[in-house]
Amino acid sequence: MTESRHPATEHIYRYFEYKHLPPKLAKVSRHFAITADLVIEWLPDSPELTFCLRQLLLAKDAAVRAALDLPDE
């Protein structure tokens, strides 16, 4: 995120960090971080953008939990 955004957008965006995760979870989470970057790039900062990121975060969290059952790399 390069330009200044609403504090709510910045607050949610930080939860898309994935480099601290184990490799099998980071691999899944990374794609959601990329999507979050694209959404922030394409859409104007607004309550709907924040809502979109919140929903994406919910999906990311579910996908990462599902990835817990993957074999270790």
Image: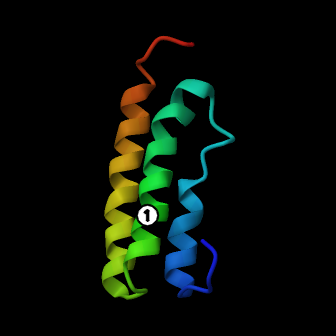
In which quadrant will I find the N terminus?
A: bottom right
**68 to the left or right of 3:** left
- Other-residue count near label 1 (Cα within 10 Å), few / some / many at <14 / 14–19 / ≥20: few
Most extreme residue toward the right, as rendered? 20
Q: Residue at x 48, y 53 (%)?
A: 34
**40 to the left or right of 52:** right
The number of discs equals 1
The picture places residue 56, in percent across and down from the top left corner, at: 35, 58
The picture places residue 49, in percent across and down from the top left corner, at: 36, 78
Q: Residue at x 42, y 27 (%)?
A: 67
Q: Secondary structure at mark 1?
A: helix
Q: Residue at x 63, y 36 (%)?
A: 21
31 in relation to 66, above or below: below
60 in relation to 48, above or below: above
In which quadrant will I find the C terminus?
A: top right
63 in relation to 42, above or below: above
How are the residues colored? Answer: rainbow
- Frontmost residue, 13 versus 69: 13
- Frontmost residue, 11 versus 2: 2
Disc 1 marks which residue? 38
Among the 4 quarters of the image, the one containing residue 66: top left
Among the 4 quarters of the image, the one containing residue 18: top right
Q: Which amino acid type corresponds to the residue marked 1 in the rendered image?
A: Leu
The picture places residue 63, in percent across and down from the top left corner, at: 36, 38
